[in-house]
Image (cartoon, rainbow, N blue to C red):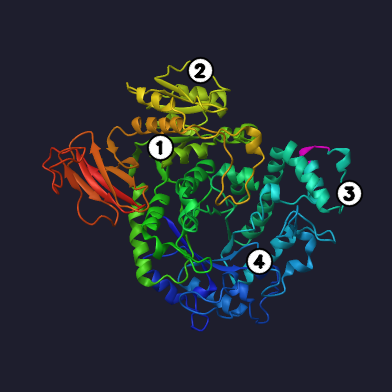
């Protein structure tokens, strides 16, 4: 495969009693799915913090031997691995040509399974308002004045070297431990913030070193939230960027690599606003792989209220790479987790297929070719998967691999990404709670207009086809003018109707609508479009959906949410009729080659055929997609593993009587194809 396959698995996936520690059997089960690397999930950071070399053999704590010290998985009971056996396992993986990473989280478990290092150094924890202390704040200092970040990097580098690991992978609670408004407001950090932001706090909040009572930290949090939240966000982003710069410098000096799950949110903006993590800063700091946390199906299956997560999560793959094209991205693929007790592989295989096909289907038009958004997948988690199940996964990975590699041109609308607009969004959202670019992308997908491709603003002059430009008004003037002169295809743009007048750019609009039912109304405008009748869209926009329109103050009081995996940012109302009209415009002005009754994306392949990616949004029923081409269809090939039988050619595009011809007579322009519940079918069409 062109894409890298990484596997994240705890030691319970291997067998310490086997002569090769179970490495051979594990890799044999994977069959044709050859991993680039395996991240050995040692889980507790004390594998680093308590490391004192390998001169003596010792039994590792049980929370290093399995995730949260879980007693068993499908295969075996948790085994008491020693540090020497762990080193042997790394050596055995190397013999098979597989890299081995040390994978940890930033947890502390109240000394439940061993005496934890952090309990001897409480000054290094985060100091939370109301919640006390938890986690590891690397910008702090030991009580004797030593820097924690420097100490940790030194311990990490020695650990990697002694065991022979090829690098480190960090995950939950490590990067960072909490959200920006549930972070550290102790006197040490607060003084650093005041200095960084060049601020003076009110006299009644004069900083007394070591005054970390709840009353003091609460006042600091309140003052920052109400007056200086954007500055606090930038301060946190700088701190994390500097930490990763130090860590990467140390690890790279050993010839090893870093994988970071730093985007524990649903898009680059929410990651910045809620967590204080600037993804682009991490790439600049030297992080070798960013690991987007794209696990919509596992989270959705926890509760029916989470069912609208798919498009929200999936957009992270495309938008992350668009923001940081210099980086490498290996996304989580949620397969199963015996500890967290969810199993997509067995309980929702149609949705797992959908996740594989979608993740490896996102792409970016560079202006001189098409590239995949993701560099690969991180199988999460890899223990307990049997040989026939790896074979099943491998078949779907192979089918997904062909989606981007053969694409010559993107026919469906491409989302336009601008770094400048991203930076402008921080203040704009903070002052208005308006829809972000990510919100526009996934709301359009929910309404049937799915964007699987993007283009960076500087590459627009070299591309052709329809464009979608959310929040056009947040672009700088020179980028707006460049887009106004674009003639490569239709452009659909949204902007604040209250704060932006696009007439000043001299664009001759083909169509324009405004949301009449929002206190902060948005507008949509189109240029370069073929002649069209938009009266039905205007009628839809004129109907109020009856939903409340909360004001900015009410929304701001809710921000930011604690659980970003489930919750999202608070947004001003965009009426359903207006959002639906925007999605309908994108569908009408997208690919003129293909029309489909289910959501789809269309691409032209290098051999001249059309690839159509069809999604069934109904999780409980089979979908039946009627596909109509602009001219007679010569041949349709099914790329995915389902359906098995050929498509059914239609004499009537609406699917009336006389359908079900399995062979085209050369005159039909339409065919019908099935899609699994909640799943994806991909077909190639020769016209």
Residue 615 makes an appearance in the image: yes
Question: Would you say the residues marked 3 and 2 are in contact, meaning their CB atoms lie under 8 Å apart?
Answer: no
Q: What percent of the width, then of the height, locates residue 57?
A: 65, 82
Which of label 1 and label 3 is nearer to you? Answer: 3
Quarter of the C terminus within the rendering: top left
Q: 10 Å neighbourhood of mark 2: few (<14), some, or many (≥20)?
A: few
Q: Which residue is mark 2?
A: 505
Q: Which residue is mark 4?
A: 45
What residue range appears in magenta?
196-200
Q: Secondary structure at mark 2?
A: helix
Q: Which residue is mark 1?
A: 368
Q: Look at the picture and state if 3 lies above or below 220.
A: below
Measure the alpha-carbon separation of dots 4 and 3.
32 Å
Q: Which residue is mark 3?
A: 208
Give me the residue at 43% from left, 37% from top: 444
Measure the alpha-carbon separation of dots 3 and 2.
54 Å
Measure the alpha-carbon separation of dots 4 and 1.
44 Å
Q: Residue furthest left?
A: 665
């Amino acid at each position: 495969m062109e894409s890298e396959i990484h596997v994240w698995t705890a030691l319970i996936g291997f067998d310490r009693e086997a002569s090769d520690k179970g490495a051979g059997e594990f890799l044999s089960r994977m069959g044709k799915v050859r991993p680039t690397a395996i991240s050995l999930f040692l889980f507790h950071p004390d594998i680093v913090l308590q490391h004192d070399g390998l001169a003596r053999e010792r039994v590792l704590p049980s929370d290093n031997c399995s995730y949260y010290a879980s007693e068993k998985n499908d295969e075996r009971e948790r085994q008491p691995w020693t540090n020497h056996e762990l080193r042997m396992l790394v050596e055995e993986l190397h013999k098979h040509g597989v890299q081995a990473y040390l994978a940890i989280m930033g947890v502390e478990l109240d000394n439940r399974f061993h005496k934890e290092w952090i309990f001897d150094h409480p000054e290094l924890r985060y100091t939370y308002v109301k919640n006390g202390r938890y986690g590891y704040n690397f910008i702090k200092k030991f009580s004797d004045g030593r820097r924690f970040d420097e100490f940790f990097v030194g311990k990490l580098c020695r650990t990697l070297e002694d065991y022979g690991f090829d690098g480190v992978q960090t995950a939950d609670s490590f990067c960072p431990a909490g959200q920006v408004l549930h972070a550290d407001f102790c006197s040490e950090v607060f003084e650093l913030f005041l200095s960084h932001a060049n601020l003076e706090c009110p006299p009644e909040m004069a900083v007394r070193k070591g005054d970390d009572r709840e009353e003091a930290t609460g006042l600091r949090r309140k003052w920052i939230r109400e007056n200086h939240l954007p500055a606090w966000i930038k301060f946190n982003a700088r701190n994390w960027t500097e930490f990763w710069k130090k860590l990467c410098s140390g690890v790279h000096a050993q010839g090893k690599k870093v994988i970071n799950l730093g985007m524990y949110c649903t898009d680059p903006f929410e990651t910045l606003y809620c967590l204080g993590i600037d993804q682009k800063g991490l790439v600049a700091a030297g992080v070798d792989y960013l690991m987007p946390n794209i696990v919509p199906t596992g989270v959705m299956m926890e509760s029916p209220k989470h069912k609208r997560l798919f498009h929200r999560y999936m957009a992270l793959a495309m938008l992350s790479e668009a923001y940081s094209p210099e980086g490498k991205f290996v996304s989580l693929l949620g397969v199963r987790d015996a500890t967290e007790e969810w199993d997509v592989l067995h309980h929702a295989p149609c949705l797992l297929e959908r996740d594989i096909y979608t993740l490896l289907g996102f792409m970016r038009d560079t202006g001189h070719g098409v590239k995949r958004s993701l560099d690969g997948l991180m199988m999460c988690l890899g223990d307990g998967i049997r040989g026939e199940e790896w074979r099943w996964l491998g078949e779907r990975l192979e089918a997904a691999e062909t989606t981007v590699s053969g694409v010559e041109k993107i026919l469906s609308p491409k989302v336009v990404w601008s770094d400048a607009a991203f930076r402008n969004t921080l203040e704009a959202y903070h002052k208005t709670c308006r829809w972000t670019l990510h919100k526009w992308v996934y709301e359009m997908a929910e309404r049937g207009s799915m964007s699987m491709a993007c283009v960076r603003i500087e590459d627009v002059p070299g591309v052709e086809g329809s464009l979608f430009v959310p929040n056009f008004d947040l672009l700088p003037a020179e980028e707006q003018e460049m887009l106004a002169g674009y003639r490569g295809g239709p452009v659909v743009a949204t902007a604040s109707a209250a704060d932006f007048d696009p007439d000043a750019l001299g664009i001759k609009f083909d169509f324009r609508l405004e949301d009449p039912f929002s206190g902060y109304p948005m507008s949509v405008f189109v240029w370069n479009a073929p002649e069209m009748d938009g009266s039905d869209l205007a009628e839809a926009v004129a109907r109020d959906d009856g939903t409340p329109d909360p004001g900015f103050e009410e929304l701001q009081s809710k921000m930011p949410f604690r659980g970003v995996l489930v919750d999202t940012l608070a947004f001003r109302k965009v009426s359903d009729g207006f959002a639906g009209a925007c999605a309908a415009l994108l569908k009408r002005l997208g690919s003129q080659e293909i029309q489909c009754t289910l959501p789809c994306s269309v691409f032209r392949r290098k051999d001249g055929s059309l690839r159509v990616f069809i999604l069934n949004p109904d999780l409980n029923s089979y979908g039946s997609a009627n596909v109509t081409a602009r001219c007679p269809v010569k041949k349709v090939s099914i790329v995915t593993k389902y359906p098995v039988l050929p498509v059914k050619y239609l004499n009537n595009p609406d699917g009336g009587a006389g359908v079900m011809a399995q062979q085209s007579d050369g005159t039909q322009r339409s065919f019908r194809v099935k899609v699994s519940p909640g799943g994806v079918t991909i077909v190639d069409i020769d016209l």
